[in-house]
Image: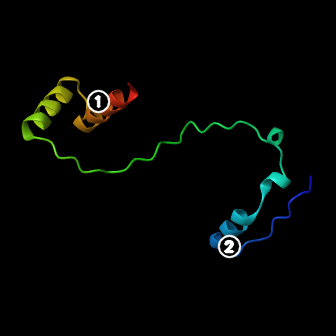
C-alpha cells in the first residue's frame, strides 16, 4: 500500500475537496482501523411543528407533571415507543 501524502490546506473548503476526490481504499485496509466510541456525542435534533388539539396537549402536560418531567420529553418518549414497535 502506498502512503498517502497529505498536503497543507489553505482552508476547509480545499481540504474537503481533496478528501472527496481521494480514494482512501488504496492507502488503508480495514484492519488498519480501530473501533471508536464517542460517549459524549449527542444525537442531533430538529425542531418540528406539531398541531395537537388543546385538550390532548393539556392531558399530556398533566401526565408529564405527574411524572415530574417536561411535557416535550414525554411526547418524545411516546413517539420513540410508537416507532419501536
Secondary structure type for disc 1: helix
Q: How many marks?
A: 2
Q: Is residue 32 left or right of residue 20?
A: right
* Furthest residue in direction bottom, as rendered: 10
Quarter location, residue 64: top left
* Residue at position x 36%, y 31% in the image: 83
Relative vertical location of residue 85 with respect to residue 21 in this rendering, above or below: above
Tell me where residue 70 appears, x and y as whole percent. Answer: 25, 35
Q: Is residue 66 left or right of residue 48?
A: left
Quarter location, residue 24: bottom right
Q: What residue is shown with label 1?
A: 78
Image colouring: rainbow
Quarter location, residue 14: bottom right
Q: What residue is shown with label 2?
A: 14
Q: Are marks 2 and 1 in contact (CB under 8 Å)?
A: no
Q: Give the number of the disc on residue 53.
A: none
- Lower position in the chain sequence, tag 2 or tag 1: 2
Label 2: how many residues lie within 10 Å, few (<14), some (14-19) or many (20+)?
A: few
Tell me where residue 8 appears, x and y as whole percent. Answer: 77, 71
Secondary structure type for disc 2: helix
Relative vertical location of residue 16 with respect to residue 64 in this rendering, above or below: below
Amino acid at each position: 500500500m502506498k502512503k498517502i501524502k497529505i498536503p497543507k490546506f489553505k482552508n476547509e473548503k480545499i481540504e474537503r475537496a481533496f478528501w472527496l476526490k481521494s480514494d482512501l481504499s488504496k492507502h488503508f485496509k480495514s484492519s488498519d482501523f480501530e473501533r471508536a466510541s464517542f460517549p459524549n456525542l449527542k444525537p442531533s435534533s430538529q425542531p418540528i411543528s406539531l398541531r395537537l388539539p388543546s385538550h390532548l396537549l393539556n392531558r399530556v402536560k398533566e401526565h408529564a407533571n405527574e411524572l415530574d418531567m417536561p411535557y416535550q420529553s414525554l411526547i418524545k418518549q411516546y413517539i420513540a415507543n410508537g416507532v419501536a414497535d
